[in-house]
Amino acid sequence: MRLAAAVEATFRAFVTRRESSALPSDPGPVVLAALTVFALASFGAAIAGNIESLVLFRALQGLSAGAGMVVGRAVIR
């Protein structure tokens, strides 16, 4: 149990420090860009003709969703 608490404390300290230092002054354009990439990747995944294209578009979805979540959490904080 102590190991889990130590890992969680380290992770929280790292994420808190990284989010606050990496936050742009106006996060609106970053969130809009992430949403645009996500929408385009979703469309690409829907019309993917082969598995390689599908994997590529799904990877883009994951990257853009991750960017949107990090900036969104930093703005709420």
Image: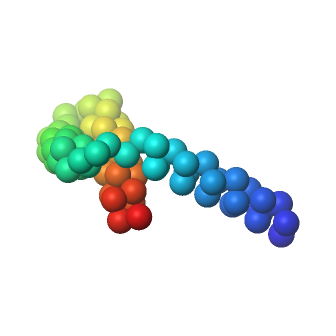
On screen, residue 53 above or below 29: above
Of residue 76 and residue 68, the one placed in the foreground of this image is 76
Residue 23 in sight in this render: yes
| Quadrant occupied by the C terminus | bottom left
Residue 61, image x, y percentages: 30, 45
Q: Residue at x 46, y 49 (%)?
A: 19
The residue closer to the viewer here, 2 or 14, is 14
The residue positioned 40% from the left and 52% from the top of the image is 70
Question: Quick check: can you spot residue 51?
Answer: no
* Quadrant, the N terminus: bottom right
**Res 9 → quadrant:** bottom right
- For the residue pair 34 and 10, the one nearer the viewer reads as 10
Q: Report x, y in % for residue 56.
A: 32, 33
Q: Residue at x 35, y 65 (%)?
A: 76
Query: Is residue 15 found left or right of 46 in the rendered image?
Result: right
Spot occupied by residue 58 in the image (x, y as percentages of width and height): 32, 42
Q: Residue at the spot x=61%, y=57% of the render?
A: 12
